[in-house]
Amino acid sequence: MTTAPPAEQAAPPRTTATLFTPSPTSSPRPTAPPLSPVRRTPLVVAGLLSVALTAYVWATHGAKPGVLLLLGIGLGVALFHSRFGFTSAWRQLVAVGNGVGLRAHALLLGTTATLFALIIGTETGLFGSQPAPSGGSIGVGLIVGSVLFAIGMQLGGACASGTLYVVGSGQTSVLLTLGGFILGATLAAWRFDLWKDLPAWEPVVMSDHIGWFGSWVVTVAALLLVVLVSRRVQARRNPPPLGPVPSARGAALRALRGSWPLAAGALALAVLGAGVLLVSGGAWGVTSAFSLWGSELVRALGGHPETWSFWQQPGNAKMLAGPVLADKNSLTDIGIMLGAAVAASLAGTWALHRGIPWRTALASVLGGVLMGIGARLAGGCNIGAYLAGIASGSLSGWLWGAFALAGTWVGLKLRPLFGLGNPKPGDGVC
């Protein structure tokens, strides 16, 4: 008796990877734990401070500074709820090849570039402002400063915007990073004459050569290439997934208490950052305020920062002569800390951390100092130089990002000296 050959099993359908297909990881991302109860006392304090300061700024300095403070509060809420980071994203990419964070950067950059092209290209501004692109000079200061900044990020545990929102959420160790950041930015302003004449070329802004539409097309195309390359790298290295953060259940509650998807955070930050440009005429920035705060402290202690050549530059002199609560970057920086405090309290995670190991504390201060100096040398940080630069179609923004990636690699090599760990391929999460 003969038997029929077994029927061949149909091969499983092949799925075609698209731009939006999730990139592979070595294991599924764990389920996010539930949120803790709302921290009522920090929420009331942060909420009252936000309302009182906004009312004071609005009454004393006018609607424009008041709106900038509100935009900063919104930035703080978005940064915390999405845990949108630059430091962790570059660490995960360089250490294990997980490019999820970098692709979120690309979405933020592309959306911001679109909004910038619309605002600046049509010369649309509020409160009489004239929107202008952020084009940084290209030279030794940009290269050295971006590398130093990236090393500082990995040692200090946060970038410029990350330092502010993490401080707002009660993370004591990053308060040390903020102190070092202000110290480094002030030192760089004090010793301005040592680095002001470093070799540099004039800014290269694409809109000056191919118009705003052409600049936007080139920027978006380059960002799509970054996304595709990062996906290829992740597919080859098969890294651990990102670690989950506590999350609310249900879309409405999640919008209020977190956590937001990185994509939602990127879109919110792009809209709020464009709002800063629309209101003030300048892109969202962070670190110039740290030089101002430190210099004001020097003046309060009897020093004379107005004699420093840094503060005798035309734009800087006006900043030092005016009130801190009328300074654009100071307002958004303070707003970020307040907004993050409100968001962290709603999420139930606001807490003051104690018992910081001495090596971690040392790394935090050292990392902050390096970021402060690096930001001044490079003409900005991950926000003012990288985000605003690329969104403005400036070559300096792309170069800042490239050299910051190199600095990230150096920073990862230094982290173990301070007892700080790096993601590894065999970890459950990165």
Image (spheres, helix red, strand yellow):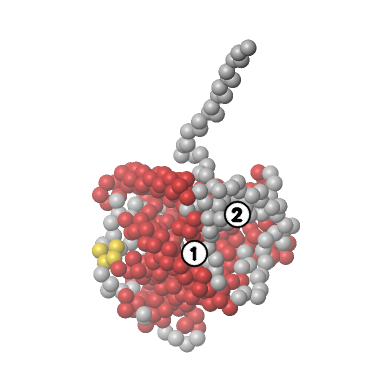
Give the residue type at disc 2.
Gly
The answer to whether the residue labelled 1 contacts the one labelled 2, judged by CB atoms less than 8 Å apart, is no
Q: Residue at x 73, y 62 (%)?
A: 40
Can I make out residue 111 in this image?
no
Q: CA distance from mark 1 to mark 2?
A: 25 Å
Tell me which residue sits at (65%, 60%) in the image. 344
**Label 1 amino acid?**
Cys
Please identify the quadrant where the N terminus is shown: top right
Q: Which residue is mark 2?
A: 428
Residue carrying label 1: 159
Badge 1 or badge 2: first in the primary sequence: 1
**In the depicted view, which residue is nearer to us: 27 or 179?**
27
Q: Position of residue 383 (x, y in %)?
A: 44, 60
Q: Secondary structure at mark 2?
A: loop
> In screen coordinates, is 334 left or right of 307?
right
The kind of secondary structure element at disc 1 is: loop
- Which residue is at 47% across, 50% downward? 237
Task: Indicate the position of residue 119 as horizontal and vertical percent values.
Answer: 40, 48
Q: Nearer the viewer, residue 201 or 245?
A: 245
